[in-house]
Image (spheres, grey):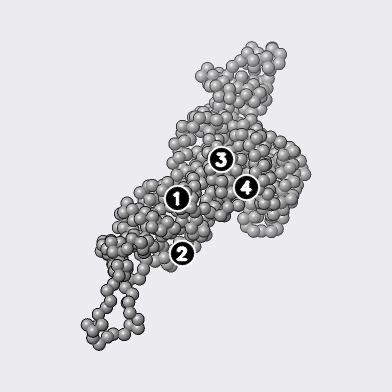
Amino acid sequence: MAASKPVEPQGGPGIPHWKLALAVGAPLLLGAGAVYLWSRHRSNKKDSQRRTPEGRASPVPSGGGGGSTANPEANPPPEMSPLEKAQAAKNKGNKYFKAGKYDQAIQCYTEAISLCPPEKKVDLSTFYQNRAAAHEQLQTWKEVVQDCTKAVELNPKYVKALFRRAKAHERLDNKKECLEDVTAVCILEGFQNQASMLLADKVLKLLGKEKAKDKYKNREPLMPSPQFIKSYFSSFTDDIISQPLHKGEKSDEDKDKEGEQAVVKEKFGYLKAKQYMEEENYDKIISECTKEVEAKGKYIAEALILRATFFLLIGNSASAKPDLDQVISMEDSNVKLRANALIKRGSMYMQQQQPMLSTQDFNMAADIDPQNADVYHHRGQLKILLDQVEEAVADFDECIRLRPDSALAQAQKCFALYRKAYTGSNPLQIKSSMKGFEDVIKKFPKCAEGYALYAQALTDQQQFGKADEMYDQCIELEPDNATTYVHKGLLQLQWKQDLDKGLELIGKAIEIDNKCDFAYETMGTIEVQRGNLDKAIDMFNKAINLAKSEMEMAHLYSLCDAAYAQTEVARKYGLKPPTL
């Protein structure tokens, strides 16, 4: 994990990953409680789900008073107008609908449509929508779409027709069309209806996964920025491959030669790759490791794991896994290499949303190398992602016992304790965890991660001024860390509603590291909320091209698709959500 990027179950802080890019304050993921309440509401009000036709079941008498006449022939009823005849046919259809006789209901609604004067657009749209409701009960989805389309053409802001068409498009697997319709519904309803929000969430996730699967498989490998790579390796303390060259890595014939540089320059393979590591010439490392592997050289295990590490860094997990598998199976190789391979494969599994496999790898690493602090540090991060905070704290404690100077583990332990206290609304524990952060930054004043995590906790507690100071400390320690500038920019928005300053800082992050996907994603989310949809889509597409995992790419596609759906809704119906 990059040293300055916090571990959180649902993405980063500030404008979070779970925010729907449709409108200000419209959450993408609904909590279990909200879903339960919605389900309960549905079970109590089954007739309120936009499934019944509109209008009363019986025609309204044209006369008043309701009294019977002695001689009906002496007072013949007045001739009904075309609209009244249409309404009567519709009301008859409603009776059939409620009786479950949907074919007869369709015939009546068709009669109502043919009788209705064309200038009565609202009434006509209702008849089409009612006929669509009957088709929906018969699961004739194409007819549902056709009738709802007629209804919307006559009444463009007809929520019932738009939502019914969205559901029919979902059944027909027309995800793009479904998303556009449900986006319009969400805007018209002010993002207050759980059913339309859930459908939007579902379709966005499906679209994101589909697009990411194809895009990620065919993407061009992209090396992250040097700052990201250094931050990644800094999260390991027992990683042999990330250590500087040692004399023990020379071959026998090189022992008499002076200076390691002279030795490495004459070599190829793993030792050459290690030289490139020190020079930050990362693009050449995979090819040199491949030479070592193909030659079955002395450092084949080291070359395999170094190559696998850079495959992971460029997002090529399919190529990384065989190398990691091979090292793990080498029972006669250095146990720290095998443990390191298990940690990296376990982290890869977690990225792929396979927590059981991930847990197995971390547990195996602890079994074969129980004195390896990295195992407990990285397993602690896994436990935070799984919301197993007590187990995470226990792992961080073991890491600290093995390496008392591990500032990173101590800072992340504080963060785990803070999360537990914050989610449990325990003021005493919150106060204790905040003091823990103070102790960490006092003991390790050069640990940027400590300041960054403390700043997040301070932001949660609305201590914005002090949080800003902590981010300044981060920037002083790591001026090339783009992520910190993004967090500081988001703080300006939350604290002072200073949009210009926030965007300036996020722009600075992109200037420092033009491969910082988090900066592009955040910029895109803000532009959505400002109503600058074209710019937002451009930012999301840049983030997509930089995504480091298929899961991350799917999330970014969801944001991009949500923004694009808004542009289509604005174009077709003139609907726009509130903006900043």
**SS at badge 4:** loop
Residue in view at x 53 percent, y 54 percent = 577
Which type of secondary structure does the marked residue at label 1 adopt? helix
| Identity of the residue drawn at 64% across and 17% down | 264
Rounded to the nearest whole Å, what is the CA distance between mark 2 and mark 3? 39 Å
How far is disc 4 from disc 2 in space, using C-alphas?
32 Å
Mark 3 or mark 4: whose residue is earlier in sequence: 4
Kindly report which numbered mark, 4 or 1, lies closer to the viewer in this rendering. 1
Q: Are marks 2 and 1 in contact (CB under 8 Å)?
A: no
Sooner in the amino-acid sequence: mark 4 or mark 1:
4
Name the one closer to the observer, 336 or 412: 412
Residue 539 tag number: 3
The residue singled out by tag 4 in the image is 13
Please name the amino acid that badge 4 sits on.
Pro
Using residue 547 as the reference point, say whether residue 478 is left or right of it: right
Q: Earlier in the sequence, mark 1 or mark 3?
A: 3
Choose the circle earlier in sequence order: 4 or 2. 4
**Residue positioned most to the left:** 73
**Local secondary structure at mark 2:** helix
